[in-house]
Image: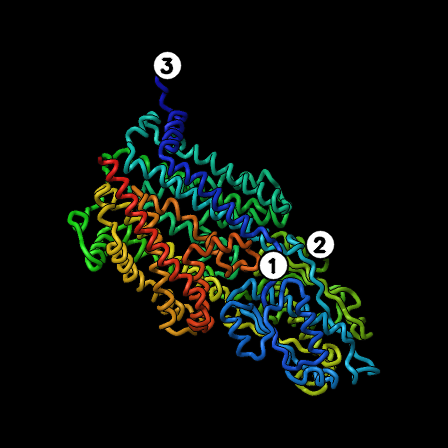
Amino acid sequence: MKPPAQPGLLLVATRELRWMWRDRLALFLAIGVPLIAVAILAATFSNVVIRNLQVSVVDADRSPTSLVYVQAIASAPGVSVAHRSGDMTSAMHAVRSGEAIATVYIPENFERDLVAGRRPQIVVLYNRQYFTPGNSASAALSAGIAAATATLGPPGPSRGRSYAPGSLVVEQYVLTNPALNYAQFLLRAVLPHVLHVITAIAAGYAVGSEFSRRSRRAWLRAAGGSCLTALVGKLAPLFGIFLLMLAAEAGLIHGLFHVPFRGDSILMGAAAILLVAAYLSLGALLQLLTGNLALGMSLTAIICNPAFGFAGVGFPVLAMNGFARLWGDLLPLRWYIQILFDQAVRGLPPSSSVAPLLTLCALTSAAFALAWWRLRVVARTNPRRPTEPVAPEDRAPVSGIGGAMAAEWRRTLNDRGVFGLIVLAPVIYGILYPQPYLGQLLREIPIAIVDQDHTPLSRHITQIVDADEAVAVTVRADTLAEAQAALARREVFAILGIPADTERDILKGRPARLAAYVDSAYFLMFNRMLQGLSEAAGTVTSEIAARGARLDGSLARAALARSAPVEVVSQPLFNPTGGYASYVVPAAFVLILQQTLLLGSATVGGVAFEQAGSLGRRRRAGARTILGQALAHLLLVMPGVALYLIVLPRIYGFSTLGRLVDLFLLACPFVLSVSFLAQFVSVWFKRRETAVLLFIAASLPLFFMVGVSWPVEAIPDVIRSVSRIFPSTSAIDGLVRINQMGATLHDVRRDWLILWALTGIYGLLAILAARSANRGMAGDAR
């Protein structure tokens, strides 16, 4: 006869693996959910180059010259002319409705003014509310217009002119990501974020289950009474699984997407080990502190879900407010991302990552030590199995739509977990989520200047660059090597080289080329630094061309007409200041509304089965009952809708151009469709925590599938079609266009109709699923 296993680490780990195999939900959470999320994200970013951004062209001149510009725009890489609008009204409708991301306006008499040397304007109006596609379209259109201007040659009156000074040309040298692969930038950061959420939730579920349906005493007995052995043994299987997941993600990025790894793999492996250990410890700690599975997982979600913003991926840490920096510094993900970008992207020496690695190690040790301490405290107390109060409506049947509404209201208000998800979570997220982005604009990004000319002109260039709000000259290096050392220490993020003979070339009438070495590890910083350097170079060029004349005078204008015969006016729409919070937060608010309602209302279905079994589920079935519950959810969520669409945008200073009637007419089918979706999926839930376990990691993949951050034109058709089954896709597009872009309900009628269709489909599915489940239970009873 085989002797019983001895208590210890191996017995605890074996017990955990057996439980995961029997539970299946835990196994699916640890393996299935991350694999599905990674597959969706990999497919979403499979088109690494942004192409076919739809633009509208208004050619009011209709001359051979204007036709040359239209053809050049149509040939520009990255954009496609979708509309030839007759006027600006129809062109703006195309932008507001999403049919175009930008509009190009060629005015009347363009050809005549060009020949006369009057420097006519071409106006590019681009939608910067959709940040990445809008900026990409603007850059592509400017390049296309510049190419068309170059083919025309100098205008007639300028031929044979006397001496004209040269101009400054900024030549960019992209560091760390020379192909400007946006997918490479995002995938590196997004995949660890998704995995860290799942890691913390999985650890919380493993520990929290000991307080609900498993035995805490048996757990400690398997460890021989050692709390350290109990904690390490429980987390060991998950540690191995998620470490393999991180390795698989690295293989996906560097293998499938052919993204180079430039740093130290051993140091990166150590950082990965610490990241997984940190969030396993954090998930366990929150469960041990609360002693309640649902509450502990809710706290885990509140801490982990917004961590992507606090990690400084989209909006850099140097531009965050004090609270966001402090909160971010307490998150292990923040330091892992810094190590990841320094090693994998920048290829810095390992010594540069020692400080963040030690910080990550300290946070991991603190989280594990606190979890161990709390387990020792819990082990000395008598186990108490928490019970949720049974609401009165679960003891007596209800009838009619009104009765179902009242019963759902009481369930929500009497259950702390559900009330927290549907009512309190939107308030907490509304305060916490926007904090990293409230700085809005990147200002005074530190750069280095290497002045090898040492002339009055080079010193003036340095002064003008330093005066631009985007950058600040913090290092004046004598050699490029000295500046590169400062770049490696993260003291600066770009280097502007002023070569010898710059002033001499200008005086000889030749273009002087300034070398800009720009760190592209973080795209927002990269674009902002290039903008600042280009603006400064343009200012100096205008001053040189004016040769002492007033910059707004006729001599300066004539000089500009000779050097740049066509003026390109690039005007952002709807988010004119380019505020990052104004771009990302309104869309995220809509997704938060979906996630909190989906989790909360689906949790109610699991609670009903936990409390009353098949009888509780049967009482939630029926068309009138399902409709009444959806109406109850609508009334419960409407304060959150008003908070996110009316109150907070005004507090945070976001644009609010839409009519309230249009907003609420679009919000109604959105909320109803989410409610019906939640009721449909919850038919099969037997536990309150199932909804959180299955859907908590879906928020970030859904955000990128919408087309706000990553253009819809770059998303594969299959992923784009699948994303439409989630109400948030149409709701984000429609509500953002109404509230931030001033669109009408007519402009977004496609999104509105899709939401009503989803409402009908999910409502019907909820009714059919409930009836099918009830028939199955009745058959089992017989």
- Is there CB contact under 8 Å for labels 3 and 1? no
| Residue 744 at x, y percent in the picture | 43, 73
For the point 45% across and 49% down, which residue is it? 331
* In the image: residue 773, left or right of residue 248: left
Give the answer, above or below, for where 330 lies relative to 100.
above
Nearer to me, 675 or 250: 675
Helix, strand or loop at label 2? It is helix
- Which is more N-terminal, label 1 or label 3? 3
Q: Quadrant of the C terminus?
A: top left
Crowd band around label 1 with a 10 angstrom C-alpha radius: few (<14), some (14–19), many (20+): many
Helix, strand or loop at label 3? It is loop
- Which is more N-terminal, label 1 or label 2? 1
Residue 556 visible in the snapshot: no
User: Which residue carries the number 2 mark?
Assistant: 481
Mark nearest the camera among 3 and 1 is 1
Q: CA distance from mark 3 to mark 1?
A: 63 Å
Amino acid under disc 3? Lys
Amino acid under disc 1? Ile
Point out which mark residue 2 bears.
Answer: 3
User: Which residue carries the number 1 mark?
Assistant: 50
Residue 522 position by quadrant: bottom right
- Which is more N-terminal, label 3 or label 2? 3
Nearer to me, 664 or 158: 664
